[in-house]
Image: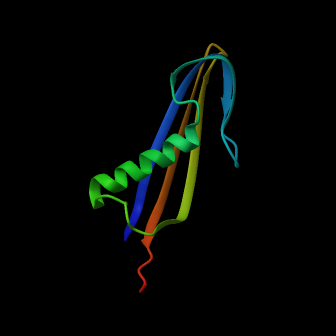
Amino acid sequence: MATNVSGESQAGYLLGISRPNRSAPNTLALLRVNGEPMLMKQALENLWKNFEAEYGSVIGKTLALVNIRYDADASNYLLLYSKMNVSVRADVVEFIGTR
């Protein structure tokens, strides 16, 4: 139904360090100053919002994400400020059947 749909999320932290990890991004910080607390969840929600903006509502459809790709990037500035970016990209397929 759609290819290469993406969603992103980011957060900034004071007095900490962030690092991308294969399974999930990790941050150890004193205070989150902006962004969402659950970056992967927010990135997936943004992916679906981007899908709906281009292809319409998902209500009543049987959809699945396939070929999911996840990327994370961290920027650290002398332990004073760190920023974590998460991106999720996937293809969306629709299952159509007779009832």
The residue furthest front is 99
Query: Measuring 48% from the left and 60% from the top, which residue is drawn there?
Result: 90
Query: Measuring 37% from the left and 60% from the top, which residue is drawn there?
Result: 59
Query: Measuring 48% from the left and 55% from the top, which residue is drawn there?
Result: 89
Location of the N terminus (image quadrant): bottom left
Location of the C terminus (image quadrant): bottom left
Left or right of residue 76, residue 92 in this image: left
Where residue 75 appears, as percent x and y from the top left, is: 58, 28
Q: Is residue 56 above or below residue 31?
A: below
The residue furthest bottom is 98
Q: Residue 99 versus residue 81: which sits nearer the camera?
A: 99
Q: Is residue 67 above or below residue 20?
A: below
Where residue 31 appears, as percent x and y from the top left, is: 62, 15
Q: Quadrant of residue 37?
A: top right
Q: Quadrant of residue 55?
A: bottom left
Left or right of residue 60, residue 40 in this image: right
Q: How is the image coloured?
A: rainbow
Query: Measuring 32% from the left and 58% from the top, which residue is drawn there?
Result: 57
Q: Quadrant of residue 80?
A: top right
Counting every numbered tag in the picture gives 0
Where residue 18 appears, as percent x and y from the top left, is: 66, 29
Q: Is residue 6 above or below residue 40?
A: below
Left or right of residue 17, residue 58 in this image: left
Q: Residue 10 versus residue 74: which sits nearer the camera?
A: 10
